Amino acid sequence: MSRLAQTHGLTDIQQEILSTVRDFVDKEIIPVATELEHRDEYPTQIVEGLKELGLFGLMIPEEYGGLGESLLTYALCVEEIARGWMSVSGIINTHFIVAYMLKQHGTQEQREYFLPRMATGEVRGAFSMSEPALGSDVSAISTKGVRVGDEYALTGQKMWLTNGGSSTLVAVLCRTDEGHPEGTAPHKSMTTFLVEKEPGFGEVRPGLTIPGKIEKMGYKGVDTTEMILDGLRIPANRVLGGTTGRGFYQMMDGVEVGRVNVAARGCGVAQRAFELGVSYAQQRHTFGKAIAQHQAIQFKLAEMATKVEAAHAMMVNAARKKDSGERNDLEAGMAKYLASEYCKEVVEDAFRIHGGYGFSKEYEIERLYREAPMLLIGEGTAEIQKMIIGRRLLEEYRFQG
């Protein structure tokens, strides 16, 4: 148990869950992560272990077979898992965003149908907003859902689908003009559809194709894909919440949870980088003493530890704010922005401490160095976070002149 990144005020149950996850990470993830990552291999055994621990149902209410835990508990578990291998935390993140959206916005029938099977990991969730041409500009989506009798026909192309191949349920944001007069604001004519599919690649159901995995610099093991919709027929009762035009708000609510998750991942990766750096600095000798005894290295360690501590505190604050039922877009944006930036800096300092060995695939820090950049762009770039933060600050501190 490290001195850094402690969370005060946790219940006995929360502490027990975290202790169990930490043990699992140390025994089942860290020893195999780098080898699996270098092979870009899906961590099947690790995922089965997470199912057995009940982590796929962590935030799903007890009435649907989950553990009914808070966002804070979930974020702290994600922090531990990312400390072992960030890709594994990605496998459960999109699952939880979809489960959260169902819990908050789904109809009773939708909750009863999906959540019990999501709690066991039988149904695995993914969510899809982005498209090849729009990046962070969600209001510009062009994928359309057109009403045809008791169904909708979905047509378009989606991008950056985490768990695109392994998932069996995808929450897909589409544009639906039904009931919305011309000139309606773009975000008010969007609808979230709950799309069930078979796992795998190729045409996984008529009108729905998951091409192959996108080859990436880091964040390997987890499958990231495109999704092509060509007249895919979806029953009207698979509109999330039963009403069109609410998709943008539903997705943004889910993304707030996702931003806390990305902040937690940044905290976990930064913690692991600090652990590797402080350990190596005490083993490696130059000029007759361990490099940890050189002031230049001590300064690096001091800066790294301070960043780990600060990022963790902001992430915990954002999670607690959401759990309290308050609006947390400001806190989630700040936590995601700070944690991802600090993660990159802590990883780079650990890399520098390793010297030439940091460039070798034998050392774990090489993997972290390729993984950290994903956090700078996942769930909205740093620039998007700063836009959100800036707008919210101007709302809070409106000039009374």
Image (cartoon, rainbow, N blue to C red):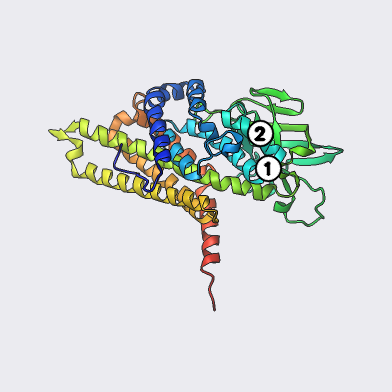
In the rendered structure, which disc, 1 or 2, sits on the residue that comes first in sequence? Answer: 1
Q: Which image quadrant for residue 226?
A: top right
Disc 1 and disc 2: Cα gap in Å?
Answer: 10 Å
Q: Residue 10 sits in which quadrant?
A: top left
Can see residue 123? yes
Q: Is residue 164 visible?
A: no
> Where 5 falls versus 230 (above or below)?
below
At numbered mark 2, what does the secondary structure look like: helix, strand or loop?
Answer: helix
Q: Position of residue 386 (x, y in %)?
A: 51, 55
Among all residues in the image, which is located at the extreme bottom?
Answer: 401
- Identified at 48% across, 40% down, the residue is 74
The residue to which callout 1 is attached is 106
The extreme right residue here reads 149
Instruction: Tell me residue 20's x, y (percent).
Output: 40, 31
Pick the residue in front: 360 or 30. 30
- Dot 1 and dot 2 residues touching (CB under 8 Å): yes
**Secondary element type, mark 1:** loop
Image quarter where the N terminus lies is top left
Classify 10 Å Cα crowding around label 2: few (below 14), some (14-19), many (20 and above).
Answer: many
Residue 48 horizontal side relative to residue 313, left or right = right
Question: In the image, which disc is placed on residue 114?
Answer: 2
The residue under label 2 is which amino acid type? Phe
Q: Position of residue 167 (x, y in %)?
A: 62, 29
384 or 27: nearer the viewer:
27
Q: Residues within 10 Å of mark 1 (few under 14, many from 20)?
A: many
Tell me: residue 163, above or below residue 242. Answer: above
Disc 1 residue type (three-letter) = Gly
User: In this view of the protein, which residue sits in the foreground, 295 or 87?
Assistant: 87
